[in-house]
Image: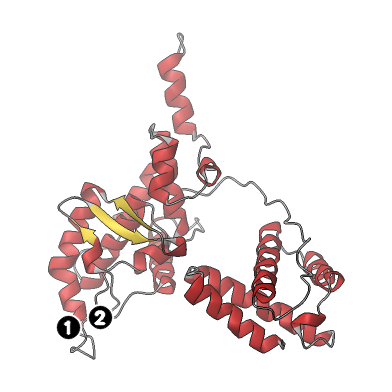
Amino acid sequence: MNLEQGYRLFLEYLQFEKHASVHTIDSYKGDLEQFIAFLKKEGVDNWGKVSHLLIRTFLSSLVAASASRSTLARKVSCLRSLYVFLMREGYVDTNPARNLSLPKKERRTPKFLYIEEAKRLVEAPALDTPLGVRDRALLETLYASGIRVSECVGLNLGDVDLRLGTALVYGKGSKERYVLLGKKACESLRLYLERARPALVEKRPDQTHPSAALFVNYRGGRLSARSVRRIVDKYIGQVAAHLSISPHVLRHTFATHMLDEGADLRVVQELLGHVNLSSTQMYTHTTKERLARVYADTHPRA
């Protein structure tokens, strides 16, 4: 099995059979392209000629280039999945990635915004233009629900019920779950749907096929994850230029604020769409505000 053919078949397997997320597919695609470039330099043109030692040499080169443990873990996971697929389909006879061990990931406290910072961010967009109204609804939705950016841009009109304050999202592995939106997000979404979205959709070139997307761009098409990043960067620059955060920080902020106010860990796990409780437990760090509140409420001399 030559490198290009195996690469193409594996990506098709991830997309159509395993139903991996777009983020996973894009990450694995980059990992494989990097590994294939390494193999070609080593004179290897076939997946069956790859040895365990060759993979270890590749990983060692990444360590020398100061790759993080999380990056190494993803590349190991990618190569293990690749060879499980190639073995299952009979394209190779041996699995050189079988005994690769996953490096332990750093346990870092997730970045999050404090309540006042989050409030300033979501209220930053002005409501005097359709794009401003859209941006307010977008930020309110991300903070209120804790959904991933990929889940947010994948929302369709029929997925949101403003009367119940819920949204049906499609998470990793095409798993469905309902999330809650809250009063402020529903108000912003209602304003967006009534005033802003119709004005944006009018600019769509192909009016015979109207967009089903909840959040649309300035031309009426579905908003992309990259555009969400630009939107968050824009308003972070307005309210807190010293902060360097990604849209994912709003998900961290949602989880942190829920747990700080006493939400059950398993409820937050379900809302976030985490398969394992350990993924949610990283948000159980304690803010200074909560420490002060608990101290004031419990210490007899506070």
Secondary structure under the numbered disc 1 in the rendered image: loop
Label count reads 2
Tell which residue pokes out farthest to the top in this image: 300
Q: Quadrant of residue 55?
A: bottom right
Tell which residue pokes out farthest to the left in this image: 194
Asked whether the viewer can see residue 113, the reply is no
Identify the residue shown where x is 38% and y is 43%.
115
Residue 131 is left or right of residue 151, and the answer is: left
Secondary structure under the numbered disc 2 in the rendered image: loop
Of labels 2 and 1, earlier in sequence is 1
Residue on which the image places disc 2:
220
Q: Quadrant of residue 66?
A: bottom right
Residue 26 is left or right of residue 43, and the answer is: left
> Which quadrant is the C terminus positioned in?
top left
**CB-based contact (under 8 Å), mark 2 and mark 1:** yes
Identify the residue shown where x is 14% and y is 69%.
195
| Disc 1: CA contacts within 10 A as few (<14), some (14-19) or many (>=20) | some
**Residue 227's x, y, as percent?**
40, 73
Residue 102 is left or right of residue 136, and the answer is: right
Residue on which the image places disc 1:
202
